[in-house]
């Protein structure tokens, strides 16, 4: 958070008058930046107006004070969901985290789901028990008292899904609450481009998003269906492919049917290029594995049954041969010949 944002938060906390807009998704579609709250003129080091409020007292918080303040405001006392001093958070009481705008199209709606559901259903995460959040069509609030930008999809590592969505700070992605920008932002270009290749490219670089991905299914921006960028010193450089080693995933186009619809889809893959399966694909794969295992078991049972039958037939042949030998021996004895005796010489 910048020093100006801190001053804005301090101004709000000390009760100074301010006028600020109601930031929402519509403002992110190219509207002018919102007016900033006036900076505080409260003397540095002044004591708090009341305990455990949005008040700057000029003194650093101890861990105990910080935890008590967070709990009193209804936020986690510690952890990735509360990495910053809550007293420095911009006021969120007038922030709009939802609106009634529809998604762009069925394709965009399906692709947004394809970019989130497989991660929760099939991906083991970045490893070592590290959490992650995958979101679609959620506001990205990157600066206090500014309207958000609304990517089609985001992925952020080491950030936990909130437990209580009734708290405003848990209803959108606030960088000062999460403590970081998302690791990957994905924009799907609709039939009416929204600055994905220029304005948003610059904005996400300023925010500090490590990877920015543009899927252009209608080729509105260029002939390239997919462009993947990596942040290098606050500037995006285009990548040759969609491999993201720091994330542990890659993004690539995939031809096939998703929810019965054939198309060229953007979807997550592992670093070896294997698609992260959807829940339906995983269930189908498990069904096929179970069916194959059942077929193998049935074939094994048939082989065992055939082997048992061959053994039984061999036993019966041995019994028949033994019975015939016994009858022959009996006839020989009846003729005065000892079947067990040595044959006489010459």
Image (cartoon, rainbow, N blue to C red):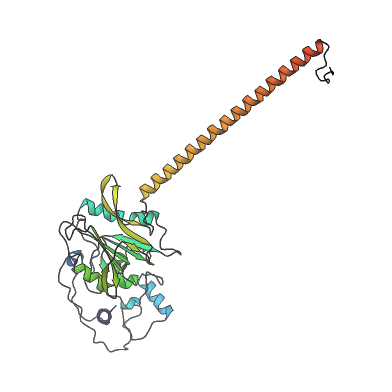
Q: Tell me where residue 291 sits by quadrant.
A: top left
Q: Tell me where residue 170 sits by quadrant.
A: bottom left
Q: Quadrant of the N terminus?
A: bottom left
- Name which residue lies at 55% across and 33% down: 303
- Name which residue lies at 75% across and 17% down: 326
Q: Quadrant of the C terminus?
A: top right
Q: Is residue 333 visible?
A: yes
Q: Position of residue 199 (x, y in %)?
A: 18, 69
Which one is in front, 11 or 264? 264
Which one is in front, 46 or 188? 188
- Name which residue lies at 40% across and 61% down: 125
Q: Position of residue 142 (x, y in %)?
A: 26, 71
Q: Relative to residue 42, is residue 119 drawn left or right?
A: right
Badge count: 0
Q: Position of residue 302 (x, y in %)?
A: 53, 32
Q: Relative to residue 246, is residue 296 drawn left or right?
A: right
Vertical arrangement, residue 37 with respect to residue 238, above or below: below
Q: Position of residue 251 (x, y in %)?
A: 31, 59
Which one is in front, 325 or 199? 325
Q: Relative to residue 102, is residue 318 drawn left or right?
A: right
Farthest residue, direction front: 346
Which one is in front, 264 or 105? 264
Vertical arrangement, residue 203 with respect to residue 269, above or below: below
Q: Is residue 91 visible?
A: no
Farthest residue, direction top: 335
């Amino acid at each position: 958070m910048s020093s100006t944002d801190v001053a804005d938060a301090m101004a709000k906390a000390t009760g100074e008058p301010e006028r600020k807009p109601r930031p929402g998704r519509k403002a992110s579609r190219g509207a002018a930046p919102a007016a900033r709250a006036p900076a505080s003129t409260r003397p540095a080091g002044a004591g708090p107006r009341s305990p455990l409020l949005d008040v700057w007292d000029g003194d650093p918080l101890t861990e105990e004070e910080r935890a008590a303040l967070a709990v009193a405001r209804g936020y986690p006392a510690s952890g990735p969901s509360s990495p910053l001093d809550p007293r420095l958070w911009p006021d969120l009481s007038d922030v709009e985290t939802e609106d009634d705008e529809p998604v762009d199209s069925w394709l965009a709606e399906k692709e947004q789901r394809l970019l989130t559901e497989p991660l929760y259903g099939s991906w083991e995460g970045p490893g070592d028990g590290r959490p992650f959040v995958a979101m679609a069509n959620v506001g990205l609030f990157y600066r206090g008292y500014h309207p958000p930008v609304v990517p089609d999809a985001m992925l952020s590592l080491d950030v936990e899904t909130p437990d209580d969505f009734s708290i405003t700070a848990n209803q959108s992605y606030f960088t000062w609450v999460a403590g970081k920008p998302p690791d990957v932002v994905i924009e799907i270009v609709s039939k009416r481009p929204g600055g994905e290749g220029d304005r948003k490219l610059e904005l996400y670089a300023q925010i500090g998003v490590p990877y920015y991905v543009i899927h252009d299914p209608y080729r509105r921006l260029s002939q390239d269906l997919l462009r993947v960028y990596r942040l290098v010193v606050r500037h995006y450089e285009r990548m040759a492919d969609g491999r993201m080693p720091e994330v542990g995933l890659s993004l690539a186009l995939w031809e096939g049917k998703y929810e019965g619809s054939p198309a060229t889809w953007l979807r997550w893959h592992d670093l070896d290029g294997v698609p992260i399966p959807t829940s339906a694909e995983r269930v189908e794969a498990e069904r096929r594995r179970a069916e194959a295992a059942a077929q193998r078991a049935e074939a094994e049972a048939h082989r065992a049954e055939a082997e048992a039958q061959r053994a039984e037939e061999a036993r019966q042949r041995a019994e028949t041969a033994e019975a015939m030998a016994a009858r022959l021996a009996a006839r020989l004895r009846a003729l005065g010949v000892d079947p067990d005796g040595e044959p006489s010489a010459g």
